[in-house]
Amino acid sequence: MTDTFREGDPVLLYQDPRRHWIAKVGEGRFHTHRGYLDLKNLVGLEPGNLVKTSLGQLIAAFKPRLSDLVDSFDRPTQILYPKDIGYALYRLGIKSGDSVVEVGTGSGALTASIAQSIAPDGRVYTYESRREFLRTARKNLQKTGLSRLVTFRDVDPSDGFLERRVDAAVIDLGDPWKMVGPAWEALVGGGVIAGFTPTVNQLEKLAESMRKNGFLILEAVELLVRDFKTEAGKVRPESRMIGHTAYVTIARKVGSKE
Amino acid sequence: MTDTFREGDPVLLYQDPRRHWIAKVGEGRFHTHRGYLDLKNLVGLEPGNLVKTSLGQLIAAFKPRLSDLVDSFDRPTQILYPKDIGYALYRLGIKSGDSVVEVGTGSGALTASIAQSIAPDGRVYTYESRREFLRTARKNLQKTGLSRLVTFRDVDPSDGFLERRVDAAVIDLGDPWKMVGPAWEALVGGGVIAGFTPTVNQLEKLAESMRKNGFLILEAVELLVRDFKTEAGKVRPESRMIGHTAYVTIARKVGSKE
Amino acid sequence: MTDTFREGDPVLLYQDPRRHWIAKVGEGRFHTHRGYLDLKNLVGLEPGNLVKTSLGQLIAAFKPRLSDLVDSFDRPTQILYPKDIGYALYRLGIKSGDSVVEVGTGSGALTASIAQSIAPDGRVYTYESRREFLRTARKNLQKTGLSRLVTFRDVDPSDGFLERRVDAAVIDLGDPWKMVGPAWEALVGGGVIAGFTPTVNQLEKLAESMRKNGFLILEAVELLVRDFKTEAGKVRPESRMIGHTAYVTIARKVGSKE
Amino acid sequence: MTDTFREGDPVLLYQDPRRHWIAKVGEGRFHTHRGYLDLKNLVGLEPGNLVKTSLGQLIAAFKPRLSDLVDSFDRPTQILYPKDIGYALYRLGIKSGDSVVEVGTGSGALTASIAQSIAPDGRVYTYESRREFLRTARKNLQKTGLSRLVTFRDVDPSDGFLERRVDAAVIDLGDPWKMVGPAWEALVGGGVIAGFTPTVNQLEKLAESMRKNGFLILEAVELLVRDFKTEAGKVRPESRMIGHTAYVTIARKVGSKE
């Protein structure tokens, strides 16, 4: 890990939970509602320090976490939330060195998160048949520095993934049941699969397809996350929250070919 | 990844979401409510296959995921739940190669999860002043094969961690505010910290301590997970659920020493 | 309202949130885990006072609220929860003097709650084709003193309710969609209907039936209630909670016959 | 209940869950985004019928439920939600003929709801020391036709309510603990109290005050309500929901004066 910001590094400019941005060290000015920052001045600064805008607003300059970068992705599709990504990664048991297939790539949010989990020498094979999505995802991944761990495939894998004996499979598209059979073929014995489905009808159909195609469903869950205000003497949940994103189904491949 | 079970491998014997156990391949008999398995017979089997007990009950023999092993840990203390662990790991941004301090070790559930995230060459320094807990945690970690990534320290770090410039810090004990100052000293600039607190009063006090000791709080959340029944035509949430485990507070170190 | 307990009055003996019972003043002894009470001694006592068992355990003697009585009902079927009943009554807008049809009666939990809302001169017409349920419900209602407001009908109203121009209709049985058309006929113009459905599939089918049969759906919701521990310095939600009971759908009749 | 709309009746003009308004039958034109309605034309119409705006938009004309009227109240203060009101009313066990004290009146949302529950011959005594709030509340109550059941008191009852032996007490203001002692004095033996508190700190302090002032806490809860989309084949919770309004504490008076 480098000690100080260098030209070209991504930087998270953080004012408060609602106002934070990703920028690139060394390139021009960054404008906020309360003055601008000269991004050249960040070169040589230790991450985590506060900097002042031209109007005196203090802003923290952090190295972005992966979830900060993902949060800033261009997103042609609905993006999964940290609650869903964090849970799925943990339950998939994905770890350094694993090989994983994913369909569809979408904006690459999940792709990047899987890639970070299998670093430094695993591999993610991500399938996306919509070309313009794949282009955006490639660009998004570039920002994370994880592209070298990802193989992008612009084909529809409903006729079969190209990979075999992968450790895990992730399905995040509108008709996930079409990918269940192909995922079974691609997975190693006992391999883990995760499916994301926004509607209950999709959840029902996905689960049925899993059961019919040689998977044992471990769990189907929804996660709710509630933000808290923590000011002393005024602790309470925020008034508004996200009510729903997607159901997460986790299953494992059972049996082998013949 | 090995292709077939070998003598001494851990195995997850999975009957259904409520009946599953961790055993060791090759050692004696494993007794269930519906007959026993000869664990010797698993040698050479490909993971994910179904085996039959002496009474004909089918059971899947899986390679355990880390969360399966953690679930089977001896636990002298309340253990964190996958929803909390998965979220915290993702928000901490912990990744391959990182160095992390943790206090207290407890049963080692979180220690193991962090260790898997920083593999193959990062390091976890975990502090636990209660000797008998540390002994249990060491044994638990051994089962995961991740011990080589963990340094156990049987001291109370409220006077200071031994490490410097670590990427992340995790606090999970009854009076977390005592560890906030020491964690600031141990972290690299902009380093991320996570605290787990069961009561609202602890959350309030921890958050206040973080703000006073040079941290910027990114979020304080609670996560709720609801299990679903997915049988076709009868989809519904389970009648019972976990109502609360702990609040998770995520913050970043701001500023530097002098 | 009477000032003191009289022979035959129902009494709520309340030790703590998990140990409380309904008894009848004046009749024999009431045994708890920590001694017994002579129920004769309650005669003349002002409600709300503490009494002592033979072993010195303090127990509060309250006049039961309706929800206490309902909680003690014999229940051949799954009973609705206060969260669902309270919400539905408020959203149905049921008030003193209203006439309401209900199907099915089940244990009479909802029947009693509606009856209390339409007192002193409204009327509930409740339908239940399973004779043994109706017998239990009648007995349950007797305990509440609200029977005079209820007409029990042991017929299946899927061919039509006997009533016309009622203010509200409540459907709580396994195939609620069969009752939607008949409810439309029974309701006054703009009358409100509530349906309770445990599974998502039932919710979907009920909602579709409502839309096709002249109703405007105002809302379909699920309610979650979390209990808190409130001991000073240790405030937190309880570890366990009810994850699901039923979805509540509220709609209004639109249009008129010809 | 009257059968058709008459001049001066309140009417709920309902287009969809987000677009609905309260108007008065017979008075001028009502303008929507898609044309206007001549409110005179509603005279003689049976409630529940659809009417057409000048631009052809269909709108249902309903008799407003109380919760519709409350929803349209002028609100100088944060208003409680139906989930909280419905639950509290049911748990308070308030019924026809009861007498209830309330502090503070606020916008009168809860006042009106209690008034409907104690009709036709109970009474609500509501205290509000902020004159301008009381004025708004009076006006709001007028719209509901329930004013005759309400006594407004423009004094601070922290020195004592004027009433004695009331069946229930409701506290909804910023420092509810001040009212706990006075409420005990005002309640009948075993009388029920409900307190609403937005922050955890208020909940903690209220609960402590209740325990010290002769109350037995039955429960302290928070309610979450999730709205569902019910379109066939696309059933799912709404993306956004209310994360928090207030904690509801229900307790009963124990003991008597001397």
Image: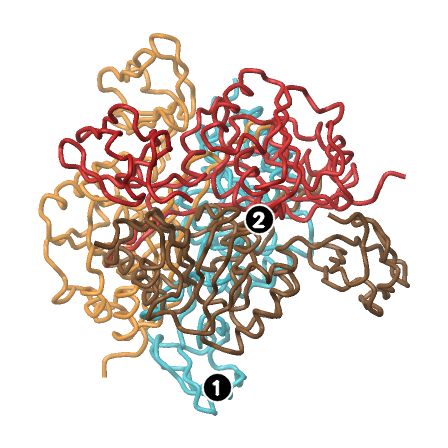
Chain colours: A cyan, B orange, C red, D brown
Report the side of B101 relative to A67 (left or right).
Answer: left
In the rendered image, the vertical position of residue A147 relative to residue C64, given as above or below: below
Which residue has dot 1 on it? A37
x and y percent of residue A230 in the render?
36, 67
For disc 2, the chain is C
| Left or right of C58 on screen, residue B243 | right
Q: For the residue labelled by badge 2, is the local secondary structure a helix, a strand or a loop?
A: helix
Q: Which residue is denoted by mark 2 in the rendering?
A: C90
- The kind of residue on which mark 1 rests is Leu
The subunit letter for the residue under badge 1 reads A
**Of the pair A189 and B208, the residue shown nearer to us:** B208
Taking the spot 20% from the left edge, 50% from the top edge, the residue there is B105
Distance from Cα at disc 2 to Cα at disc 1: 54 Å
Q: Where is residue A56 in the image (x, y as percent from the top left)?
A: 43, 90
Query: Can residue B126 be seen?
Result: yes
Q: Where is residue D205 in the image (x, y as percent from the top left)?
A: 29, 63
Q: Which of C186 and B186 is in front in this view?
A: C186
- Determine whether D130 is above or below C142 in the image: below
- Nearer the viewer's eye, disc 2 or disc 1? 2
